[in-house]
């Protein structure tokens, strides 16, 4: 298995997992984002329902990774590979980067924000950073072949 295939597999698993977390396990996501004492707040169900779109965004990215991994379509040659691995890197980077301001504020502050440096959010933060770098490495290796 090539390095790029391993990264496509990891992309598939990660974005597929994000779909499950945000679209199917919305109640679990609410527990991560909202402190226990605030879950009775009338806005909590709205927040829980609204995270489903995050899963909706992640699902097609995961399916694209799976498609490229399994079928290696004819268009998936050097130029397309470079563009798509840069796309995947940008997807991971954006998810990592939006946690940085929360981290800089100190994570959960009272009932606001979420704890970036512990529990599931730490895992999300680290894995998105690692997969951003891994996809970028594949893109750079492809670029060096040109």
Image (cartoon, rainbow, N blue to C red):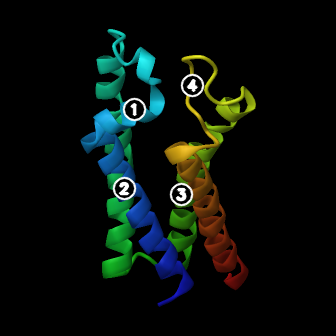
Query: Horizontal placement of 29 versus 143: left or right?
Result: left
**Of discs 2 and 1, which sits in the foreground?**
1
Sequence-first disc among 2 and 1:
2
Sequence-first disc among 1 and 3:
1
Residue assigned mark 1: 31
**Of discs 2 and 3, which sits in the foreground?**
2
Identify the residue at image location x=51%, y=64%.
84
Taking the image as drawn, is residue 28 in sight? yes
Residue assigned mark 2: 17
User: Residue 133's spot in the image, x, y percent?
Assistant: 66, 63
Name of the residue lying farthest toward the front: 37
Name of the residue lying farthest toward the bottom: 1
Residue assigned mark 4: 113
**Mark 2 Cα shell of 10 Å, populated few (<14), some (14-19), many (≥20):** some
Q: Quadrant of residue 46?
A: top left
Q: Quadrant of residue 52?
A: top left
- Tell me the SS state at disc 3: helix
């Amino acid at each position: 298995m090539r390095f790029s295939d391993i990264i496509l597999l990891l992309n598939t698993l990660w974005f597929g997992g994000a779909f499950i977390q945000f679209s199917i396990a919305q109640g679990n996501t609410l527990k991560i984002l909202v402190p226990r004492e605030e879950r009775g707040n009338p806005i909590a169900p709205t927040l829980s329902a609204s995270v489903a779109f995050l899963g909706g965004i992640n699902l097609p990215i995961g399916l694209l990774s799976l498609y490229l991994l399994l079928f290696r379509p004819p268009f998936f040659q050097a130029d397309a590979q470079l563009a798509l691995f840069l796309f995947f890197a940008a997807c991971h980077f954006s998810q990592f980067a939006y946690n940085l301001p929360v981290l800089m504020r100190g994570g959960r502050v009272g009932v606001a924000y979420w704890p970036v440096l512990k529990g599931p959010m730490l895992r999300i933060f680290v894995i998105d950073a690692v997969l951003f770098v891994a996809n970028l490495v594949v893109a750079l290796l492809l670029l060096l072949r040109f």
